[in-house]
Image (cartoon, grey):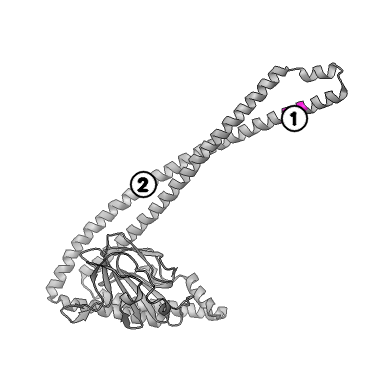
Amino acid sequence: MSTRFFAPIAAILLVAASSGLPAADEEAELEALRGRMTDMRRALESDQGKRSAAETELRKVETDIGERNAALRRLRDQQSETARRIGELERERVAVEARIGVERDSLAAQVRAAYVTGRNERLKLLLNQQDPAHLGRMVVYYDYFNRMRRDTIASVSADLARLNAVAAEQETEAMRQRQLEQRQSQELDKLEQARARRAEVLVAVDASIRAKGDAIAEMETQAATLEKLVEELREVLRDFPVEADAPFADVKGQLAWPLRGRLLRDFGQPRAQGRLKWDGVLVGAAPGTQVKAVYHGRVAYADWLTGLGLLVILEHGDGYLTLYGHNESVFKSVGEWVAPGETIAEVGDSGGQAQPALYFEIRRGRQPQNPHRWFADGLALR
C-alpha cells in the first residue's frame, strides 16, 4: 500500500499540540498512532492479498495511473509558473530597453551641449577674468553637468548589464519550458501505456468474477472491506479529534457538492439484486473533473481500495467522515488538512468502473447519511 497511508509527523504533532499535551506525551501518542496505522495497513493488505491476481494487478496499474496523473498536474503547474516568469522577464526587457533609449537621448543631448560650448570653455572662463560671482556659478554649473553626464553613463551601463542578464534568464527559462514539455510528453506516453494495460486487466478481472460465478458476492465482499476500513479508521483516529470553528453538523443543508455532475446512482437505491443498497451517491462527470472537499477536515485515508479504487476519506470531527471514491488521481496525503472547496482529487473510473464517476458518501460512525440533506442544492438527474 502507498506510503501516503501514514500521517506526516508535522500534522500529527499539530493535532497533539492542540490538545495541550506535554512533549513526552505527544511523542508517545505519535508512536502509538503510527504503530496502530501500521497494524491496520498490514491487516488490510492481508485481506486484499487474498483477492485474485487480476484484481491485485488492477490495483497496481490504477495506482500507477493516479501517480502519473498527479505528476502531470505538477508538470502543468511548473509550466504555468515558467510561462509566468517568461512573461515577467519580457515585460522587464521592454521596460529596460525603453529606459536605455531615454538615457541615450539624454546623454546625446549632453554631449551636443558640451560640443557647442567648446572643449576649453571652462579654461576660457578662468582666463577671461569675468565677475567672480558669475565665474563661480559657471564653475558649479559645469561640475553639475559633468556629474550628470557621468551618472547617465553609469546608468546606461547598468541597464545594459541588466538587459544582458534578462536575456540570459529568458533563455534559461525557455530551455526549462522545453524540458518540461519533453517530460510531459514522456509522462503522457507512459500514461497511455498504463491505461492500455488497465483495459487488459479489466478483462481479466471480469473473467475472474465470471469464473467464480457470483458477482453479487463480489459486491458484498467489497462492501465488507469498506466497512472494516471505516471502523478501523475510527478506532485509530479516536484519540486525535478534529476541531473545527463550526461543527460539521451545524452546516447541514448548507454545503456545496464536491463537483457538478449527473446523478447516476442514489442513496438508498437497491443494488446486488436487493441484497445491498447504495450508502452514497454515484455522480457522473468528465474524467479529470476536480473533486473538492465539502468542509474543513483532515485526510484520514488516501489510497486504493477494492471496489472504490483510489479513495479519499476526510475526517470532520464528532464521528463524521466524507468518502470520495473512483478517483483518477489523488492530490492529498494522510494527515493533511483541507479547507472547504479545496481540490483533493480528480474524477476517474478506478476500481474497475466502466465510466468516470465520483462515489460520494457521508457517514457518522457506522451510519451512512443521506447526502442530499446536507447540500444547499440538488444534482442533475441522469
Q: Residue at x 39, y 55 (%)?
A: 74
Q: Is residue 144 magenta?
A: yes
Q: Earlier in the sequence, mark 2 or mark 1?
A: 1
**Along the viewing direction, whichever of 125 and 191 lies nearer the viewer:** 125
Q: Secondary structure at mark 2?
A: helix
Q: Residue 81, percent across and down?
A: 44, 50
Q: Which residue is mark 2?
A: 181
Residue 4 covered by magenta stretch: no
- Quadrant, the C terminus: bottom left
Residue type at numbered disc 2: Glu
Residue 32 sits in which quadrant?
bottom left
Q: Front-most of 34 and 140?
A: 140
In which image quadrant can residue 249 be found? bottom left
Name the secondary structure under disc 1. helix
What's the magenta region?
A: 141-147
Q: Which residue is depicted at the point 41% across and 49% down?
A: 79
Q: 290 left or right of 176?
A: left
For residue 282, what is the image quadrant? bottom left
- Amino acid type of the residue tagged 1 in the rendering: Tyr
In the rendered image, which residue does mark 1 sit on? 144
Image disc number at residue 335:
none
Which quadrant would the N terminus be assigned to in this image? bottom left
- Left or right? Give the position of 316 relative to 203: right
